[in-house]
Amino acid sequence: MKENQYRKPDRYYQAGVVISRALTLILLMLSVLLPWGISPWNTAVAETPQITDLRSGQLETASRLVIETSDPVPVSLLLLVDPHRLVVDFPSSRWRVEDRGASGGLSSPLLKGYRFGSPAPNISRLVIDLDGPAVPEQIFWLPPRNGNHRLVIDLVDRGETAFRVAALALQTNQNMAFSSPPTASYQDDTPGSQVPLPQPRPRPPVTVTDTLTTDNGTANVPPARPSTQTRDEAKWVVFIDPGHGGKDPGAISIHGHKEKDITLKAAKELAKQLEATGQIKVVLSRDRDQFLHLRKRIELARLHQADIFISLHADAAPSSKARGVSVFTLSDTASDKEAELLASRENKADLIGGPDLGVTDPEITPALLGIFQREAMNQSSMFANELMLAFDDLPTLKRGHRFAGFAVLKSPDIPSVLIEMGFLSNSQDESYLVDASYRRKIMQGVTQAVLRFLENNNHNLPNEIAINP
Ligand code: ZN
């Protein structure tokens, strides 16, 4: 039956015949290079792989797109703006969708509709119209069923900045290989033939400085952010994370001042200043003396679709002479010994609250997580540079932009920094840190840097693509 279907002439068939020999050669070459290994001994190599169907469905946390193909084929992804779209390219394959038009609607909340075509003889292109800045967080192939291979793409709306991070990351990583499901639980694709009903869009967050400090992790899924069209009226979201809290006091000075209290006071000062700009909505990881896992802090920031993540600290150093203000961003290797020690102590502080599942979101395909995170790290560095410039007038020592593996900075799609406002183990720094006017001054610098970074961080993303020649 499959054979007959293939032989049935259609408007794509003729072109398919013309290019099939060339494609056979290309596939032979690709089979050497690509991990799914379309081998020359596989009979499928004689035929151009076909894309046979597509559908969407809604999971609890994501909108799912499923694309059926006759063979596992290479895939590349792009994100476009104005309006938000996902482009899925399949080089070396052709459309063979029997029961659908070349465009139509989709039923998931984040996926509005699709169009497909062939911009060049050997490229099949699918464009998905997105309802908001939804990004692909997972992509994988399911084992074949009834001879069909299924490519699964799960999309989540994490806000405009996460969309930009993902779009830039995908732009520079066009030759990624996506393979098997991330976990065994994905052995079957949920939408299948019975696509579940779309879930209602989540509610917007309640108020400015609304703190989502539930201990049981039942925080609401975030709201849709206003689209770019209404960006002028929309506010940026800055997530402020006062370090430590509750049973984790952080550093304690010889005079008994606790880091957890100083970071909370500084966070409230920063929140006040950012909100006074009228352009920013602030979300605090905690607004009281409360313990929070590092992973929870990241989760909350992502749930609120934060544009920037700022963690505030005032740690201790082995030497009481160590002093000054530093801005840290994430890196595999620390910039210096002291940075390495600080990060490892901070990460261990998480254990005070009992075991945690880990700091990275286990639901993300490592491949996508990796490329998004690299782009987020680039942007974090740009923000760190703005911060150091803005700290120029501070009376204390400027230690500069430094790097270390702080777990709390591992949001895969949010520019994240950790500010060490000073060392509680140094008596001069301690006198600054407990002084409200010093905290006001340092937070004036942070506010200035936040505005400068957000206003300048408008990369030009592509907004046009041809779907047919
Ligand atoms: Zn700390």
Image (cartoon, rainbow, N blue to C red):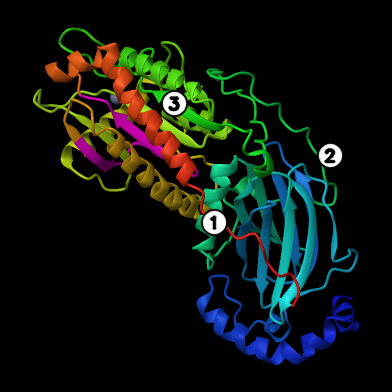
Q: Quadrant of residue 60?
A: top right
Q: Which residues are magenta?
A: 399-422
Q: Is residue 295 above or below residue 110?
A: above
Q: Is residue 281 above or below residue 428?
A: below
Q: CA distance from mark 3 to mark 1?
A: 27 Å
Q: Is residue 336 visible?
A: yes
Image quarter for ligand 1:
top left
Task: Return the residue nearer the eye: 273 or 417.
Answer: 273
Label 2 with label 3: CB-CB less than 8 Å: no
Give the label on residue 197, or none.
2
Question: Residue at (62%, 57%) from the top-left corner?
Answer: 79
Upstream in the sequence, badge 2 or badge 3? 2
Name the residue tied to disc 1: 460
Name the residue tied to disc 3: 240
Dot 3: element: strand
Q: Amino acid at mark 2?
A: Leu
